[in-house]
Image (tube, helix red, strand yellow):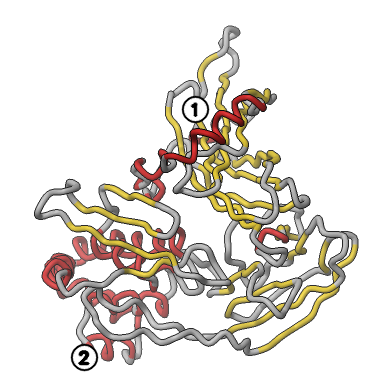
């Protein structure tokens, strides 16, 4: 069941228009580090937005029912979860002006003990043109715990990612930004005028992140597509699509602009790391040039990776423990930080793998700050990541590198090697 409350009244909206813009959104002061934890309760596992028209957008939220607390009912024969999903729409992280909000109260008694995910949708009054911050809160009313997830609604132009909603052949929304070689899907839209979709295909081998102290210039990105396809769209959806080739695919309604929806085709099984060919590359952060070359040219890469860990840990049991921890972080980096390249290759992925989960994460419109240790402490370590303007993803952040990071980096690498 669902009950809608707390839609803004005109008088409250007028008050917020007058007073709200004087201060930054409170989310800029909230520690968002739980977003990058391996386990969160209750856990939001995906968000998609589809623009209905110039004044309304529909938001789809996927979450795990298994992470909710189910309590016995009066009959004692069933257990029931009570929870709420709330949202608030702001012009940006920098504004405290609430443009739209609502709270939905829900319950479930059918999925107790099941590993079930649920999708809940709601309309948001996001008006064209503009880009907005959507704050989503899922609260377990039995447990008294809340998950907060900020998400961008992009409506600055007509040719944006949220013009499309990818839905697979089983009529299930694709919440991830990546697909595998067997994924068959349609792109759904609410725009009746779309009759053709342009797809720009890129197949690039992107380098991994440079060390945080590096002063080397990173190579500029070439936006010229390797290939360009065209697909038909009828009755508000594309023809059935499947892309077996690795690379990434950028879907557009207007090929003269850079905006659009991008889906990435890494190896099958992504974001997990299981195959021998996937084990060696992430070791680049821990190895010298000579060591890495030897690993990459080894005839048996699985054996080479195992030998690498055993040589530093001293025995197979200890090696297995460290190996699981390291590649566990690689997989989490893939889940959290995938942009136009695998998450482990990105700047945030690199820092996450080597240093672990930061104690504190703050986010504003164009910057994300990670703090290891207590904020303001002389020995704490702070990394600033600047959001890049990237037509393929909203998840591309570039580390502000400093020579001061060199000592901390080598201490952390040495910790892994010992």
Determine whether 194 is above or below 44 in the image: below
Identify which residue, 257 or 261, lies in the foreground.
257
Pair 2/1: label in front: 1
Q: Residue at x 25, y 65 (%)?
A: 354
Determine whether 330 is above or below 209 in the image: above
Q: Position of residue 309 (x, y in %)?
A: 22, 72
Residue that carries the numbered disc 2 in the rendered image: 290
The first of marks 2 and 1 along the sequence is 1
Identify which residue, 74 or 168, lies in the foreground.
168
Question: Is residue 106 in sight in this rendering?
Answer: no
For the C terminus, the quadrant is bottom left
Identify which residue, 74 or 341, lies in the foreground.
341
Identity of the residue furthest to the top in this view: 74
Identify which residue, 353 or 368, lies in the foreground.
368
Q: Position of residue 325 (x, y in %)?
A: 29, 59
Question: How crowded is the residue under tag 1: few (<14 C-alpha within 10 Å), some, or many (20+)?
Answer: many
Q: Relative to 91, is 94 on the left or the right?
A: left
Figure quadrant of residue 329: bottom left
Give the number of the disc on residue 140: 1
Identity of the residue furthest to the front in this view: 18
For the N terminus, the quadrant is top right
Q: Position of residue 394 (x, y in %)?
A: 52, 63
User: Which SS class for mark 1?
Assistant: strand
Q: Residue at x 73, y 46 (%)?
A: 56
Q: Residue at x 80, y 68 (%)?
A: 240
Q: CA distance from mark 2 to mark 1?
A: 52 Å
Q: Position of residue 289 (x, y in %)?
A: 23, 89
User: Which SS class for mark 2?
Assistant: helix
Q: Relative to 265, is 191 on the left or the right?
A: right
């Amino acid at each position: 069941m669902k009950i809608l409350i707390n839609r803004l009244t005109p008088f409250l909206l007028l008050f917020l228009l007058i007073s709200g813009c004087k201060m930054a959104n409170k989310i800029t002061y909230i520690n968002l580090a739980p977003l990058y934890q391996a386990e969160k309760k209750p856990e939001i596992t995906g968000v998609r937005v589809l623009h209905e028209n110039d004044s309304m957008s529909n938001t789809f939220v996927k979450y795990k029912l298994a992470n909710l607390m189910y309590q016995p009912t009066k009959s004692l024969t069933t257990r029931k979860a009570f929870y709420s999903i709330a949202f608030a729409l702001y012009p940006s992280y920098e504004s405290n002006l609430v443009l739209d909000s609502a709270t939905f109260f829900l319950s479930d008694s059918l999925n107790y003990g099941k590993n079930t995910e649920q999708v809940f949708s709601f309309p948001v009054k996001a008006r064209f043109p503009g880009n907005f911050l959507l704050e989503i809160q899922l609260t377990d009313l039995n447990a008294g715990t809340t998950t907060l997830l900020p998400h961008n609604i992009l409506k600055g132009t007509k040719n944006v990612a949220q013009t499309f909603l990818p839905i697979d052949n089983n009529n299930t929304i694709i919440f991830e930004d990546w697909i595998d070689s067997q994924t068959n899907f349609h792109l759904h839209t609410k725009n009746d005028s779309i009759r053709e979709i342009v797809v720009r295909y890129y197949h690039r081998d992107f380098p991994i992140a440079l060390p945080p102290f590096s002063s080397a210039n990173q190579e500029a990105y070439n936006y010229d597509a390797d290939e360009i396809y065209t697909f038909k769209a009828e009755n508000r959806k594309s023809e059935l699509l499947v892309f077996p080739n690795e690379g990434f695919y950028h879907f557009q309604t207007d090929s003269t602009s850079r905006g659009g929806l991008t889906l990435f085709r890494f190896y099958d099984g992504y974001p997990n790391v299981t195959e021998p060919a996937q084990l060696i590359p992430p070791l680049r952060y821990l190895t010298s040039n000579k060591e890495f070359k030897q690993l990459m040219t080894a005839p048996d890469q699985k054996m080479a990776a195992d030998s690498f860990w055993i040589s530093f840990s001293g025995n197979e049991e200890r090696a297995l423990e460290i190996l699981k921890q390291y590649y566990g972080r690689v997989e989490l980096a893939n889940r959290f930080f995938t942009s136009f390249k695998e998450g482990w290759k990105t700047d945030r992925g690199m820092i996450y793998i080597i240093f672990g989960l930061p104690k504190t994460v703050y986010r504003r419109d164009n910057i994300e700050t990670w703090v290891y240790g207590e904020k303001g402490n002389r020995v704490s370590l702070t990394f600033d990541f600047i959001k890049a303007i990237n037509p393929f993803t909203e998840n591309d952040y570039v580390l502000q590198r400093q020579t001061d990071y060199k000592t901390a980096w080598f201490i952390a690498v040495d910790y892994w090697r010992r």
